Image: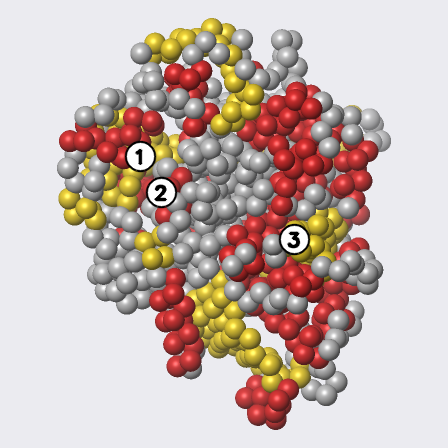
């Protein structure tokens, strides 16, 4: 619980011991620091202290307009600018957040602009932190322990401005944007009432104007902004009834798309400035290793190369351009130590995990009922299976690239990261600067999927020391090989699941023993109605840095649970869909989602020989997703995914076009990982190097269409960016079992199918 | 050495080592950053451009090999009057991009396919569209290609699965 939100990885990877070591990077815990956990949290409107307000005003009002609550600004021409603390890397959160604020504000959507909030502590995302606090502790009851301004202060102290946990819309949107929009609307009405000399109750708002219906007089928001910005705001305004939504629930097009189809969007790797040089890097191949020695001469002999820089665990070549830097780096023959990790391999990790699990001393345990007693009574109706999943690479299409310029005592950084504020903090520490001496300029990102959290972003440790050694701006680009070999992967993990069945084919007890770095309890919900359950986490840390990978622990836990449900169905001699049905409560949201996906997929329609359907349902990030995957087996034993269906209950859909894209993309990413992806280790180092040996799914192997359907249950809003991923891999494995009889218990699939 | 060629209809001459990949000349010497670096080994297609109308992964073609040739990048797809190419318009209508990083290459691959076969069927789309998209936008890529070639009805059917 004392984990720093932006831990210094060096402290943890420097240890020479060969034995597994805790990195200190808790993949969820970095979201909230110790102060917050002690302090508790609060929902509601964050009413900024005066000092913060004045800084936010200074940062946003330079071009005119009036700032409200740091989150938004209204200009004289009625333009509403919404400041998002979340990065939009294509998940559409900027558009969705804008929709939510503008809907409550009754703003004219054609005059709404969503911008990335400055990487300043005035824009730390309070709603996110307080919400995750409730979610993580499972105690929403504590949320009113502290007044909102205090929580805001704590958040800023922690420098959190994160995008992750499928959080933007459900937390920042629900508890931030909508509340701000509603409160500002009331202030605009009050201002109009004063100006028009009529009671506020006689005024209505629409299309960025306040109108006195009786007299027909109207004032535009732009005219009212200056006065309204000086008024005190209602801390708990009444939000719209969903039936009155005008923007929420509509598929407005995303504002960032045109620039992404004409080549004009400027990503971090595209940044340039006069005098800038380009650098590339090679870090110790074995995690934990250090740079021992390097002869710089061969690189310096390459035309265009200007300098070789030695870092603690890496060597960097700076040149006029990337190609020269890359040639210079290839010419070097650096000597690295292995940090005592030379014996680590994929096989050694699985062996150590098995031994740890068999020793029977779980680190964390959750569940209810007496599983052991039920197992004893079960006799031969006790079923067990073991599963293994490999390290997964994020494979964001834009490799890491950050430009640094150290000038006049300040380090300026340009790049794309999931937490601009946290990026400043980490870069400052690595460069021996204070946070005020680091200026971060957030840019568009070519994917993230969890890789761009500052907590796992070593490039921030590299860029400061590099920029401080040269008088010019320098753009550090990681090659794809560097990217693949030095990832912060979804952890290699293994599990043994056991369950007892009664004479009616009902599960009487369930145990999941899983071995990996993180305790997944509270993250992936166990949804089935089973009298006795036991979920035991055996904590294991390899020499790798485990990072959050889209949907975090829910990919592997979802694979374990939903593969095993099919195995139990087979043991009970039942259809996998109906077997799940009878373990879900009547009238539950889960059952509705499961039934809907089975109906859409035509679950009972016969398929030709060699084809099969698989079903899986996982709740993660507050959203329930069931998926059906249909495969036809190729003659070589590999599966061809023919169709895919997803039914989603995330409570309320803000932007259906975008939500559909997130679920569809998540499902395809899940299929990709299950089919072919694996990072393996030999002699402590990553074996794979590029897309040639870390294959991602391509268009021809993806389903031609993904049928995505939403059940608008109106329940508490869940996330949308991540929950589409977890059901995909078990649904695929279950489909293969249905089609071929082969039960996949180890991922990836293709490695076995062709063997 | 000085190497001359045509980019998006303009004559250019650059001073570069002969082995420099076309990608880096486009990005760093000519400031055409719409063409992206993804893998450096012609495996992902983010760097796709047209060389004499042929789809080409520019990270793996030395600039010396394109001397005297005509290259089109994503920035050069617009018509002379500034209107977006029909494929780009279809991409917006279908809201294809998520992170967007691979989309320049996807659009260059799609336009090359359409230039070559006119009205591609699903099998031709499967065979030609080999660029990687980590966001998994493939269904909408297919839908946009079909829509851009007057096969919108087919695209709608595909969407309904």
- The numbered disc on residue A433 is none
Q: Are marks 3 and 2 on the same chain?
A: yes
Q: Measured from the top left, where is residue A323 in percent x and y?
A: 33, 27
The quarter of the image holding the N terminus of chain B is top left
Q: Measured from the top left, where is residue A275 in percent x and y?
A: 30, 19
* Residue under label 2: A482
**Colour scheme shown:** secondary structure
Between A459 and B64, the residue placed more toward the observer is: B64
Tell me how far mark 3 sits from mark 2, CA to CA.
35 Å
Where, by quadrant of the figure, is residue A551 drawn?
A: bottom right
Q: Residue at x 56, y 35 (%)?
A: B131
Chain letter for mark 1, please: A
- Going from the N terminus, do you reach mark 3 or mark 1 first? 1
Q: Is residue A132 above or below residue A656?
A: below
* Residue under label 1: A280
Q: Nearer the viewer, mark 3 or mark 1?
A: 3
């Amino acid at each position: 619980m004392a984990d720093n939100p932006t831990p210094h990885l060096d402290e943890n990877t420097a240890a020479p011991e060969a034995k597994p070591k805790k990195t200190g990077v808790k993949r969820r815990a970095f979201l909230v620091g110790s102060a917050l956990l002690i302090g508790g949290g609060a929902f509601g409107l964050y009413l900024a202290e005066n000092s913060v307000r004045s800084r936010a005003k200074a940062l946003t009002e330079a071009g005119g307009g009036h700032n409200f609550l740091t989150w938004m600004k209204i200009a004289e021409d009625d333009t509403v600018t919404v400041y998002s603390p979340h990065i939009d890397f294509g998940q559409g959160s900027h558009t969705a957040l804008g929709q939510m604020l503008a809907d409550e504000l009754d703003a004219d959507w054609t005059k709404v602009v969503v911008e990335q909030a400055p990487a300043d502590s005035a824009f730390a995302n309070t709603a996110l932190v307080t919400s995750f606090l409730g979610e993580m502790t499972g105690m929403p009851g504590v949320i009113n322990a502290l007044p909102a301004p205090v929580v805001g202060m704590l958040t800023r102290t922690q420098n959190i401005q994160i995008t992750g946990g499928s959080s933007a819309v459900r937390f920042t949107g629900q508890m931030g944007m909508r509340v701000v929009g509603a409160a500002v609307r009331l202030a605009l009405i009050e201002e109009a009432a004063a100006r028009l000399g009529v009671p506020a109750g006689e005024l209505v708002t629409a299309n960025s104007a306040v109108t006195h219906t009786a007299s027909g007089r109207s004032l535009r928001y732009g005219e009212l902004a200056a006065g309204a910005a000086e008024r005190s705001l209602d801390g708990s305004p009444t939000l719209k009834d969903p039936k009155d939504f005008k923007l929420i629930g509509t598929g407005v097009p995303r504002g960032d798309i045109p620039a992404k189809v004409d080549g004009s969007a400027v990503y971090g790797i595209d940044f340039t400035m006069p005098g800038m040089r380009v650098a590339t890097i090679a870090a110790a191949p074995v995690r934990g290793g250090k740079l021992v020695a390097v002869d710089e001469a061969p690189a310096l002999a390459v035309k265009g190369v200007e300098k070789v820089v030695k870092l603690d665990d890496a060597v960097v070549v700076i040149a006029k351009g990337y190609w020269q830097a890359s040639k210079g780096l290839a010419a070097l023959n650096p000597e690295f130590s292995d940090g005592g990790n030379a014996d680590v391999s994929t096989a050694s990790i699985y062996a150590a995990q098995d031994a740890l699990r068999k020793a029977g001393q779980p680190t964390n345990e959750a569940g209810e009922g007496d599983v052991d007693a039920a197992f004893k009574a079960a006799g031969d109706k006790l079923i067990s299976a073991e599963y293994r999943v490999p390290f997964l690479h994020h494979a964001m299409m834009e490799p890491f690239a950050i430009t640094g310029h150290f000038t006049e005592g300040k380090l300026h950084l340009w790049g794309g990261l999931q937490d601009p504020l946290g990026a400043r903090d980490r870069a400052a520490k690595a460069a021996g600067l204070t946070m005020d001496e680091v200026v971060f300029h957030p840019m568009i990102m070519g994917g993230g999927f969890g890789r761009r959290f500052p907590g796992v972003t070593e490039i921030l440790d590299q860029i400061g020391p590099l920029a401080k050694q040269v008088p010019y701006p320098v753009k550090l680009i990681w090659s794809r090989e560097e990217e693949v070999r030095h990832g912060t992967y979804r952890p290699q993990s293994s599990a043994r699941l056991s369950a007892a069945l009664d004479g009616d084919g009902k599960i009487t007890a369930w145990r999941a023993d899983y071995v990996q770095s993180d305790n997944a309890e509270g993250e992936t919900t166990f949804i089935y109605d089973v009298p006795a359950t036991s979920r035991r986490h055996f904590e294991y840390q390899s020499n790798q840095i485990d990072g959050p990978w889209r949907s975090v622990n829910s990919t592997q836990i979802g694979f374990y649970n939903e593969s095993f449900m099919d195995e139990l169905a087979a043991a009970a001699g039942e259809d996998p869909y109906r077997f799940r049905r009878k373990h879900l409560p009547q009238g539950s949201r889960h059952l509705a989602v499961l039934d809907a996906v089975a109906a859409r997929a035509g679950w009972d329609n016969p398929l030709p020989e060699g084809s099969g359907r698989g079903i899986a349902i996982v709740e993660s990030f507050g959203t329930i997703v069931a998926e059906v995957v249909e495969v036809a087996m190729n003659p070589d034993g590999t599966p061809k995914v023919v169709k895919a269906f997803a039914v989603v209950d995330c409570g309320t859909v803000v932007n259906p076009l975008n939500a559909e894209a997130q679920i569809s993309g998540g499902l395809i990413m899940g299929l990709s990982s299950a089919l072919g992806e694996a990072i393996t280790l030999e002699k402590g180092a990553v074996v794979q190097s590029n897309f040639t040996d870390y294959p991602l799914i391509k268009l021809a192997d993806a389903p031609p269409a993904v049928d995505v359907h939403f059940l608008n249950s109106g329940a508490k809003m869940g996330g949308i960016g991540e929950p589409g991923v977890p059901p995909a891999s078990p649904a695929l494995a279950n489909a293969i079992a249905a089609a071929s009889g082969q039960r996949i218990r180890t991922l990836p699939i293709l490695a076995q199918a062709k063997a | 050495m000085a190497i001359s060629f045509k980019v998006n209809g303009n004559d250019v001459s650059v001073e570069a080592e002969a082995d420099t990949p076309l990608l880096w000349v486009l990005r760093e010497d000519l400031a055409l950053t719409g063409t992206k670096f993804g893998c450096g080994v012609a495996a992902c297609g983010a760097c796709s451009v047209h060389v004499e109308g042929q789809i080409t992964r520019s990270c793996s073609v030395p600039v010396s090999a394109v001397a005297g040739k005509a290259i089109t990048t994503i920035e050069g797809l617009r018509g002379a009057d500034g209107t977006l190419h029909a494929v780009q318009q279809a991409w917006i209508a279908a809201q294809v991009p998520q992170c967007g990083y691979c989309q320049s290459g996807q659009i260059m691959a799609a336009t090359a396919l359409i230039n070559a076969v006119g009205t591609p069927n699903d099998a031709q789309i499967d065979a030609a569209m080999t660029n990687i998209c980590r966001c998994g936008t493939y269904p909408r890529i297919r839908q946009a290609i079909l829509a851009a070639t007057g096969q919108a009805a087919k695209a709608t059917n595909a969407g309904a699965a």
